[in-house]
Image (tube, helix red, strand yellow):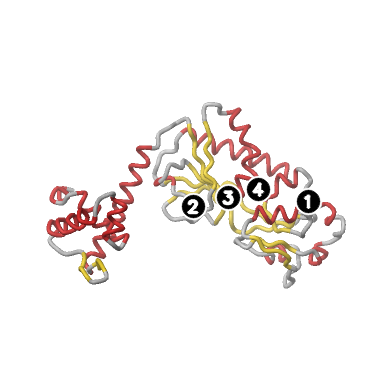
Amino acid sequence: MRNLNSVHLNGLRAIEAVGRLGSLQAAADELGVTIGAVSQQVIKTEAQLGRPLFERTSKGMAVTEAGVVVLARLEEGFKALSAAVAVAQHRDDNILTISVAPVFAARWLVYRLDRFAIRHPDIRLRIDATTRLINPATSDVDIGIRVGNGQWPDVKSELLLAQEVFPVVTPQIAATLRQPADLLKVPAVIDGHAMFGWEIWLREAGLSGHCMEERHIFNDASLCLDAAMAGQGTMLAWQTLAAYALQQKCLVDPFGIRARTGFGHYFVAAEGVREPKKVTAFKAWIREEMEESMRLFR
């Protein structure tokens, strides 16, 4: 790494910012300096590197052919530096930050948090409810739980629960159903962001080729569940979404026919990082809670 002695780090930061953001102004805003300072850093660093990385045009800074290669490596390098700083700064062993989807937090996790507090009174939980996949290596998140196929870049995934789907209806609607085909007469409330459709359950129920009558379409699974509880139709739900509503008898699974989606709930953690004790404790507790939840569910 001795070649770094010939180039100033601030200059490399300026070049990377200009290349990534596309203008001197945007780079100056991000770095908290003037446009003139960024311009001088770029000129000086190009001289130190011995080649131009940008062409000055009437439309702004255009990256040269050589600059494309250099900027790609610089962006990768600064991401790694940013991750290292985030890891160094995030060292409060008493706070456990968990990133989960809002629907998982609201419909399953929140009902159980007191039990974690009783078991681990020395650990405070901070719930980051978001649909974005957060990389724990580059943020203050300790661990995430996400639904998908487990194949996400730059993170380590560990299966928690294989996803199964099934229809849910109110007890009043369920009383009118005798066989799976009767469900075709019930309007369906649709989760527009679902990674699966009704055909996956219809096939499992021996109803391939049939279609559900769609009533409402929502962009949020939690709203779909609320609509189903209001008696507006049937929803294709999954275990963690419907567990509490089924336990409280607000909804019922009329046939007990479950279909695997090929997706699952996964723990998401940073690659190549030693797992803190607080994360190990949380994962063990979640697995126990999930096992108990699925036992009652069955």
N-terminal of the pair, mark 4 or mark 2, is 2
- Labelled disc at residue 240: 4
Find the distance from the CA under tag 2 to the CA under tag 3: 13 Å
**Mark 2: few/some/many CA within 10 Å (<14, 14-19, 20+):** some
The residue labelled by disc 1 is 252
Q: Amino acid at mark 3?
A: His
Q: Amino acid at mark 2?
A: Leu
C-beta proximity under 8 Å, tags 3 and 4: yes
N-terminal of the pair, mark 1 or mark 3, is 1
The residue labelled by disc 2 is 133
C-beta proximity under 8 Å, tags 1 and 4: no
Find the distance from the CA under tag 1 to the CA under tag 3: 22 Å
Find the distance from the CA under tag 3 to the CA under tag 4: 9 Å
Question: Up-down: is 43 above or below 65?
Answer: above
Q: Residue at x 70, y 46 (%)?
A: 243
Residue 229 percent coordinates (x, y): 76, 52
State which quadrant residue 55 falls in. bottom left
Question: Up-down: is 245 above or below 203?
Answer: above
